[in-house]
């Protein structure tokens, strides 16, 4: 199928304003890195999501799902085929003690809404800059809390376009992983089971976590957050710090001097700079401590040809 035909089909499903061609993905990732997407589509309904899935299946088109772009590094050559983002599927509502969020809603906003309704359980998420979909896939967590503690069920579309509801027990939530990432399901909606709480206490906990985050993390620079997973028995940031890597980097990318687990985009870094910095860190930590650092962030797309 030629690109012109793909474009027409996508416009018929999502509407012209929701299909962008040759869209620079650095504008859609928090680290501000990445080449262009052939097509960036932003469906407004679940049916449109399923139709795009069926289109890409029928024509075997490459397909990538992007959440809030807070944990991905898009390579400089960009992404071929269809990139889908849930900018318009970002609703949030409270039903009794459940908070129901669409895949594109920000988990920070879900945390704030829970607080407004005096519901406790999502305070840990008040500073995580990801979408509900991304948070489900990664089983996002912070300061002792994680999605696993509060999720009730999730509605997904499979890669074949089939709608399914997955209960907590079926989600196989582990450290920064879930069945959703293994099956490449697409999260449409998630329901969190919260508890009635004291609003002042919820607010205080969120303020405390925000203070801890702002004082320790280099939030003034674009980044992907923690680049590496926590290796069993160690802290990635401590290993990197003790390897003397803070302030070092390649091109515009640099290991943060504030938190060694973060690599910041200090000065118009390319994906090539960022990846080269990651490799430098991995090599040095392996040489110094014999520990292999595994990436938490995901690398997508292709290199410049
Ligand atoms: C400053 C900073 C601080 C951070 N702090 C934390 C933290 O404390 N704890 C933590 O866990 N993480 C943290 N992160 C990382 C990141 O915010 C989380 O991993 C988040 O869950 C990623 O969500 P996203 O929507 O940005 O996903 P993206 O980065 O866009 O994508 C990540 C993965 O999720 C998939 N995905 C996205 N949406 C969907 C969907 N609807 N259905 C299925 N798959 C989907 C993508 O395909 C991709 O594989 C931080 C990042 C930054 C930049």
Image (cartoon, rainbow, N blue to C red):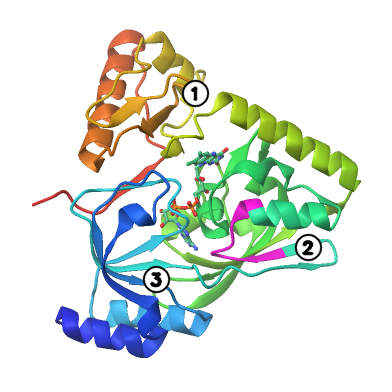
288 relative to 3, above or below: above
For residue 255, the mark is none
Residue named by callout 3 = 159
Residue that appears at 20% across and 38% down: 272
> Is disc 2 placed on a helix, strand or loop?
strand
Q: Are marks 3 and 2 in contact (CB under 8 Å)?
A: no
For residue 98, the mark is 2
Magenta stretch? 100-108
Q: Is mark 2 within 8 Å of ligand 1?
A: no
For residue 232, the mark is 1
Q: Is residue 129 part of the magenta span, yes or no?
A: no
> Is disc 1 placed on a helix, strand or loop?
loop
Residue 143 visible? The answer is yes
Residue that appears at 91% across and 46% down: 198
In primary-sequence order, the first of circles 3 and 1 is 3
Q: Quick one: label 3, few (<14), some, or many (20+) residues within 10 Å?
A: some
**Residue 278, image quadrant:** top left
In primary-sequence order, the first of circles 2 and 1 is 2
298 relative to 95, above or below: above
**Residue 243, image quadrant:** top left
In the picture, measured across the screen, residue 171 lies left or right of residue 60, that is right
């Amino acid at each position: 199928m030629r690109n012109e035909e793909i474009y027409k089909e996508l416009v018929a499903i999502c509407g012209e304003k929701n299909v962008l061609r040759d869209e620079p993905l650095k504008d859609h990732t928090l680290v501000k890195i990445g080449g262009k997407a052939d097509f960036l589509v932003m469906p407004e309904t679940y049916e449109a999501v399923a139709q795009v899935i069926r289109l890409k299946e029928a024509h075997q088109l490459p397909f990538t799902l992007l959440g809030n772009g807070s944990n991905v590094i898009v390579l400089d050559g960009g992404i071929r085929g269809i990139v889908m983002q849930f900018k318009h599927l970002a609703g949030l509502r409270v039903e009794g003690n459940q908070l129901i969020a669409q895949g594109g809603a920000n988990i920070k906003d879900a945390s704030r809404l829970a607080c407004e309704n005096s519901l406790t359980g999502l305070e840990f998420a008040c500073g995580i800059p990801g979408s509900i979909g991304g948070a489900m896939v990664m089983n996002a967590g912070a300061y002792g809390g994680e999605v696993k503690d509060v999720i009730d069920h999730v509605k997904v579309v499979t890669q074949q376009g089939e709608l399914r509801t997955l209960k907590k027990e079926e989600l196989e939530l582990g450290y920064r992983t879930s069945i959703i990432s293994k099956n490449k399901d697409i999260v449409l909606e998630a329901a969190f089971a919260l508890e009635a709480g004291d609003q002042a206490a919820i607010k205080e906990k969120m303020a405390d976590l925000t203070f801890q985050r702002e004082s320790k993390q280099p939030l003034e620079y674009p980044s992907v957050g923690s680049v590496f997973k926590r290796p069993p028995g160690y802290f990635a940031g401590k290993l990197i710090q003790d390897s003397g890597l803070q302030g070092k980097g390649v091109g515009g990318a640099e290991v943060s001097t504030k938190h060694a687990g973060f690599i910041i985009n200090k000065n118009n870094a390319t994906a090539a700079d960022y990846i080269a910095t990651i490799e430098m860190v991995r090599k040095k930590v392996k040489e110094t401590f014999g520990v292999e650092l595994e990436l938490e962030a995901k690398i997508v797309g292709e290199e410049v040809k």
